[in-house]
Amino acid sequence: MAEMKRVVAVCSCEDTMPLDLAAIAKGAGTAELRPARHLCRSQIADFKAMLGLGAGAITVACTQEAPLFAEVAEDLSYPGEISFTNIRELAGWSDQAASSGPKMAALLAASAEPMAPTRFTTLSSSGVALIYGRDERAIEMAQRLCDTLDVTVILTRPADVAPPRSADFPVFKGTVANAKGWLGAFELTINDFAAPAPSSRARLAFGDARNGAQSTCDVVIDISGGPSLFAGGDLRAGYLRADPGDRAAIEALVAEAAGMVGEFDKPQYVALNEGLCAHTRSQKTGCTRCIELCPAGAITPNGDQVAISNEICAGCGACASVCPTGAVTYQLPPADVVMRKLRTLLVTYAEAGGKAPVVLVHDGDHGEPLIEALARFGKGLPANVLPLRVNEVTQVGLDLSAAAFAFGASAVRFLGRARPKHDLSGLGRNIDYANTLAAALGYGEARAGLIETDDPDALRAALDAIAPGVAAPAPARFRPMGEGRSLLRTAITEMHRAAPAPVASVPMPARAPFGGLAINAEGCTLCLACVSACPVQALQDDKDLPTLKFQEDLCVQCGLCAATCPEKVISLVPQVDFAAWAQPPRVVKQEEPALCISCSKPFGVQSTINRIVAKLENKHWMFAGDMAKRTSLIRMCEDCRVEVVVNESFDPHENRPRPAPRTTEDYLKERRERGEDPLG
């Protein structure tokens, strides 16, 4: 089957940016490159001609006029795919535009990378709203919304509040003690709950109050002025909150609340593979990284695993960025999709002649407008800065930075807000890991970093200040595949393979997702409790001999083995030991099995059996003196031990017979024999 023809249209936007067609052609690949200078206006006929070329796909290097081009394509019933990418603000409008040809090529090539489909969770709201306030402002808001929403007002610790003129909606007194849920499914527990007397005259007078009242609603509007009812309340769908003294915020809240009726599709930001989760085993706590970082409280313990509420999840992706096992993965888009786009950016940039690339990871809500403002009103991005858009910068894990260095990046920068929307501690942790690896492998110091600014000029200054690094002398060209742990392991391995100065082992900061175990083999009894607890089979046994083996590249440093070990001889060693990664599992300890003295069946560890016998023989009353022969039972397997006990009527305790039960008649008889009055 013949491959569909593809056309790439690039426009100089009325010659406001130079087009290095020789370099840009590297990004077009096998597609037909069509240059223009005024494609959206005087050369629109050229665009219409492209639609008639029989091309299966057209990429237009312009996003500003995308609606116009899409309308023309629809009018002409163009059956193929049409996509748009921005080379103007991202590359052409810059004081270094003359050198931006390789970057334009990279942006065009990356735009052709397919994106994964998005899955959604549907939230339904019938408009039942609870307004939580403290004075007349809550009642005034209810009066404005009662025609649109089914409103109830709760006043917390009200002072003198005038009664509404008509009972268009219920008003109660109460304080929210507990709140949970999301848009369409809120549940609140209210203390000090009371209804007002209908005879309230100058001010609302409330009856007897009670605690523990329950309320359900679709929308919660909080203008109480108190603390947020939810962790990360600003991120909770259906929970609207504003300072009661901020009139502009109140107006915005009214407008937003009025639209909270109907069905709303919310992206499923993350996916959870419960079988990979290393949260707990046998009531011993292991990994809690995701729970600690979730700003919205969407992650909760659920037996041995965690549970993630798609309805509550705010999409920051911090959980996926620090999950060591790959149990939690980001889906908007998946990490391998982002990394394939990253690969295309860096590989095409190098092939087009670009040098010392810096990857700038940014989001769409903050980073994209900031970059465009820099292009329109400032110097624009430097020619070697390759912007990579993601949904949230906090979703990015160590795998992306490692892959970027492997593909030839000299630095990676993450663009955040001056006032962060999400907690950045997870991102900061991954930046530390990336810098530790980069420094140890010869890429240079501080190769990864965070730029927190809302100022376009400050962004440019931060990018100009990046010190030159050492790029990979022979950059990797692997295709990122899979997700989670396997993708991270591949990225770090390729970073090591491409390193300017590779080393065998790199010590890592605490809580890194890789590491070894320091095991005191002398104190280990080969009980193998750690093997049972290990969720990723990094600790293994042997079917033939009492053996403990360790596979370092599988270890996720969850700590379950150390928490489970009864001898407390295991401790974590965060590191990346590339030599150990390339080796089969190493034997930590191995012993001969104990053989049953009766049937020769292996049933335990010989040293353990000897130690038990030494501790009990002639030292414990059950195994002392004439009863020392009982130690032979310890040296038997479970089957032979039972057989000996049953067949030889062996009483392990040799207790005297229990005395017969004594009755009242026995006591009376003894009194009569002693000459005493039995009824005394």
Image (cartoon, grey):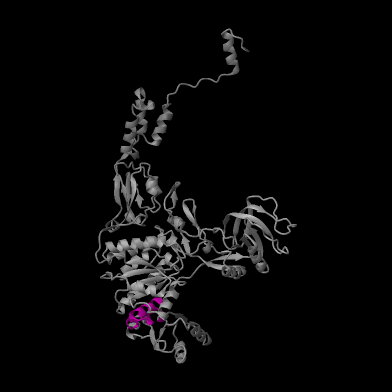
Residue 52: say if magenta: no
Residue 101: say if magenta: yes
Residue 656 is situated, as x and y percent measured from the top left of the image, at 45, 21
> Is residue 395 depicted above or below 14 in this figure?
above
Residue 1 is situated, as x and y percent measured from the top left of the image, at 41, 80
Give left or right: position of 584 versus 119: left
Residue 156 is situated, as x and y percent measured from the top left of the image, at 62, 56
Relative depth, front residue between 364 and 526: 364
User: Which residue is rendered at x = 46% and y = 56% of the image?
Assistant: 291
> Is residue 679 depicted above or below 270 in this figure?
above
The C terminus: image quadrant: top right
Q: Residue furthest top?
A: 675
Main SS type for the magenta part? Answer: helix
Is residue 525 shown to the viewer in this render?
yes
Is residue 2 shown to the viewer in this render?
no
> Is residue 366 depicted above or below 590 in this figure?
below
Magenta region: which residues?
88-112
Residue 602's quadrant in the figure? top left
Residue 461 is situated, as x and y percent measured from the top left of the image, at 35, 73
